[in-house]
């Protein structure tokens, strides 16, 4: 019988007015890889911070090796290690130095023997079959090699459970297979892993069991017996129906705002769909190829081979996508290139809205001040009032600025690409509320997504790509 390494019973955690984790329970065995699957913002990262001792919880019980965890014991013992999206490496230091330079402080040593450290690093890497030069600088390694070094560092430091948050984010299949080889070798040494993601196909590469985090609790746990046979329908079976908090639009005798009529490109044929005012429609493409083709054809409708896109009953023209009228806007929510850190808050808020805040070809100071005050009435972020620029603002503040910028445009149709991909629980909730607000005001929203769980509780209608065709599934949940 396998030894139980970690057990979580009836865990609760609230952030502000939001109950993120509710009666969550799980167990993890020695030498096991357990996958946690949930939509963006479901609480996976928050759960991992709790398990790693970096966040307190409201109620519940944690056990490690059958011993109850209390009073921050896990932080001191260093038995559970958390590896997040951001690397903790010093990029200009060698692999050996990255593995041991922190440990000398942990053991209260003033110096360590560099030659012995290098020899031990080389021996450990060789023993687990990792083809990495211990003298190489981190900046010289590939992304996956750097990630593997971080795992090995925590293994050498004595961690028995290693948590990998969004381990598959932006990694190729070849990189995931290489990572899985390392996990398999460490599993034989009794190391357990918790890995998270929102794509079933990627979790199945490494996980023995997969736990679905649904509505803050344990939705369902499946044994991953057939790793190479991906059944996307499994996703549809595990999420219970959730009441949509938004009043859905009535479409009786209403004409569509936008529709595609037998659109053909090089890879998609005879595609037709309609989007109504105030509706949120999601097109799900597990392979992403068809959605990419559709996106490109919508960006350049004059380049399609046959068929036509229609907007308000007329064929779509290039001017419909012009920033001057903002009839149709295309957005993703990757914030890195959306906010200019060196610019002031007013400049960032008004970016892309020059016509609304300018006079005689120049920014109008009074208009910009009005925009700023209106922003704070909508988003009372106290920290932003004192900022000279946007260099040190939070991700939530950045999202608020970007969403307000969209509000200023007052679009009639929005095309979103994977809206929850780069967000955490609180930011995703803010994003979802704003999309609902847009829809309530009559804006039509089209979401191109790779999966269902990302937007299943904010979408009015789903269309699925199957063999190059769009199919609507009624009563999905």
Image (tube, rainbow, N blue to C red):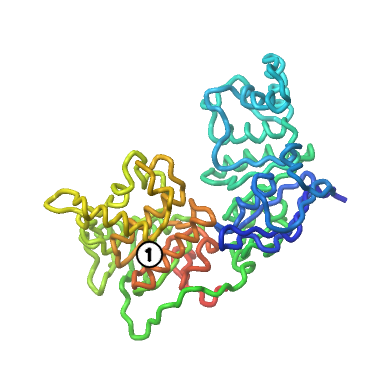
Name which residue lies at 58% across and 22% down: 94
**Residue reaching furthest left?**
360
State left or right for residue 130 relative to residue 416. Answer: right
Residue 297, placed above or below residue 437: above
Q: Badge 1: how crowded within 10 Å, few (<14), some, or many (20+)?
A: some
Measuring from the top left, give residue 185's x and y in whole percent.
73, 37
Of the 4 image quadrants, the one containing the C terminus is bottom right
Picture coordinates of residue 346, whole percent (x, y): 30, 49
Residue 21 pos. (x, y %): 64, 60
Number of marks: 1
349 or 125, nearer to the observer: 349
- As displayed, is residue 437 above or below residue 149? below
Question: Is 371 situated left or right of 240 in this image?
Answer: left
Q: Please determine whether, in this image, residue 378 is positioned above or below residue 254.
A: above
SS at mark 1? loop
Which residue is nearer to you in this view: 257 or 82? 82
Q: Nearer the viewer, residue 386 or 123?
A: 386
Give the side of residue 239 with respect to residue 284, left or right: right
Q: Quadrant of residue 291?
A: bottom left
Q: Is residue 294 visible?
A: yes
Q: Residue at x 52, y 67 (%)?
A: 456
Q: Residue furthest bottom?
A: 253
Residue 353 % position (x, y): 25, 54
Kindly identify the residue that appears in the image at 31 percent across and 52 percent down. 349
**Which residue appears farthest toward the right when viewing the image?**
1
Q: Is residue 297 visible?
A: no
Residue under circle 1?
269
């Amino acid at each position: 019988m396998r030894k139980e390494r970690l057990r979580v019973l009836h865990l609760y955690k609230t952030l502000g007015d939001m109950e993120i984790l509710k009666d969550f329970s799980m167990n993890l065995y020695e030498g096991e890889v357990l996958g946690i699957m949930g939509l963006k913002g479901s609480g996976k990262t928050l759960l991992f911070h709790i398990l790693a001792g970096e966040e307190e919880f409201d109620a519940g019980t944690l056990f490690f090796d059958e011993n109850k965890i209390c009073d921050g014991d896990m932080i001191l013992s260093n038995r559970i290690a958390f590896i997040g999206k951001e690397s903790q490496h010093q990029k200009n230091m060698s692999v050996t130095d990255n593995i041991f330079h922190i440990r000398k402080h942990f053991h209260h040593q003033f110096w360590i023997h560099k030659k012995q450290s290098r020899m031990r690093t080389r021996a450990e890497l060789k023993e687990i079959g990792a083809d990495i030069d211990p003298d190489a600088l981190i900046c010289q390694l590939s992304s996956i090699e750097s990630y593997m070094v971080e795992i090995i560092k925590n293994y050498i430091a004595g961690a028995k459970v290693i948590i990998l948050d969004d381990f598959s984010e932006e990694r190729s299949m070849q990189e995931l297979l290489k990572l899985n080889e390392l996990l398999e070798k460490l599993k034989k040494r009794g190391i357990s892993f918790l890995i998270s993601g929102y794509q079933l196909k990627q979790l199945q590469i490494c996980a023995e069991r997969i736990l679905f985090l649904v509505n803050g609790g344990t939705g369902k746990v499946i044994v991953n017996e057939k790793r190479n046979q991906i059944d996307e329908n499994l996703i549809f079976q595990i999420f219970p129906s959730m009441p949509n908090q938004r009043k859905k639009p009535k479409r009786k005798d209403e004409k569509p705002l936008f529709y595609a009529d037998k659109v053909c490109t090089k890879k998609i044929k005879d595609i037709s769909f309609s989007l109504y005012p105030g509706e949120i429609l999601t097109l799900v493409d597990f392979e992403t190829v068809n959605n990419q083709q559709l996106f490109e054809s919508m960006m350049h409708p004059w380049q399609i081979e046959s068929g036509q896109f229609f907007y308000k009953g007329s064929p779509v023209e290039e001017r419909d996508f012009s920033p001057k009228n903002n009839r149709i806007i295309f957005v993703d929510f990757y914030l890195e290139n959306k906010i200019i850190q060196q610019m002031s808050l007013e400049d960032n808020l008004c970016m892309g809205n020059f016509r609304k805040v300018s006079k005689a070809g120049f920014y109008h100071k009074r208009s910009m001040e009005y925009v700023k005050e209106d922003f704070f009435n909508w988003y009372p972020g106290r920290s932003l009032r004192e900022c000279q620029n946007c260099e040190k603002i939070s991700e939530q503040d950045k999202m608020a600025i970007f969403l307000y910028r969209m509000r200023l445009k007052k679009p009639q149709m929005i095309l979103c690409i994977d809206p929850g991909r780069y967000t955490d629980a609180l930011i995703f909730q803010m994003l979802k509320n704003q999309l609902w607000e847009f829809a309530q005001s009559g804006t039509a929203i089209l979401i191109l997504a790779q999966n269902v769980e990302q937007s299943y509780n904010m979408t009015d209608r789903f269309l699925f790509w199957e063999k190059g065709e769009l199919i609507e599934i009624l009563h999905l949940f």
